[in-house]
Image: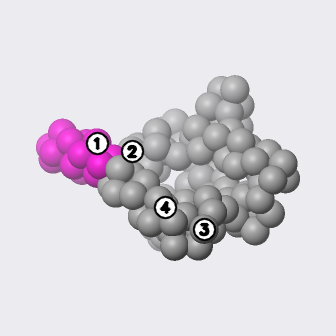
């Protein structure tokens, strides 16, 4: 549902801006999940899925935009970078063991969402400084 709604919303909002908004929302939701264990935290973490649905496709599109002949290599590297998510899971496990609960471990995805927000804001600045960087669909 999140992906379809986000695709519709991108007709009115620049993808980088929408992803930045979603990343900030997910940062807050992950922080709520970390700070309020129980039903409140669980519901907040469930809501992150709605906003996360936009992130990989948008990061992928932003990442290969303007690469020209090297787009295949760039696309391959972005797909291989997904393994980075597999590294974060054991870090979350170590934090949950160290702090005696899973709630504190959700600081890890919160930090990841902060990084995605910075990436989105940087892309918004790039597009603002060079409007030709937008694809025809985004313009």
Query: Magenta includes 61?
Result: no
The residue to which callout 3 is attached is 100
Mark in front: 3 vs 1: 3
**Neighbour class for label 4 at 10 Å: few (<14), some, many (≥20)?**
some
Q: Do the residues labelled 4 and 3 touch (CB within 8 Å)?
A: no
Q: Are marks 2 and 3 in contact (CB under 8 Å)?
A: no
Q: Are marks 2 and 4 in contact (CB under 8 Å)?
A: no
The residue to which callout 4 is attached is 92
Q: Considering the numbered disc 4 on the image, is that residue within a helix, a strand or a loop?
A: helix
**Neighbour class for label 2 at 10 Å: few (<14), some, many (≥20)?**
some
Q: How far apart are marks 2 and 1 (CA)?
A: 8 Å
The residue to which callout 2 is attached is 60
Q: Distance between the residues labelled 2 and 3?
A: 36 Å
Q: Nearer the viewer, residue 21 or 110?
A: 110
Q: Residue at x 34, y 57 (%)?
A: 87
Q: Considering the numbered disc 2 on the image, is that residue within a helix, a strand or a loop?
A: helix
Quadrant into which the C terminus falls: top right
Quadrant into which the N terminus falls: top right
The residue to which callout 1 is attached is 79
Label 3 vs 1, first from the N-terminus: 1
Q: Is the magenta stretch mostly helix, strand or loop?
A: helix
Q: Distance between the residues labelled 4 and 3?
A: 12 Å
């Amino acid at each position: 549902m999140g992906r379809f709604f986000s695709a519709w919303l991108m007709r009115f909002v620049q993808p980088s801006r929408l992803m930045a908004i979603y990343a900030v929302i997910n940062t807050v939701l992950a922080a709520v999940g970390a700070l309020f264990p129980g039903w409140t935290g669980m519901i907040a973490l469930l809501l992150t899925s709605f906003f996360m649905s936009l992130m990989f496709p948008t990061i992928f599109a932003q990442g290969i935009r303007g690469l020209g002949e090297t787009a295949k290599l760039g696309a391959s590297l972005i797909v291989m970078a997904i393994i980075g998510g597999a590294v974060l899971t054991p870090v979350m496990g170590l934090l949950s063991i160290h702090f005696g609960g899973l709630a504190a471990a959700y600081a890890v995805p919160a930090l990841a969402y902060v990084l995605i927000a910075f990436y989105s804001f940087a892309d918004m600045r790039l597009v603002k400084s060079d409007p030709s960087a937008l694809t025809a669909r985004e313009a």
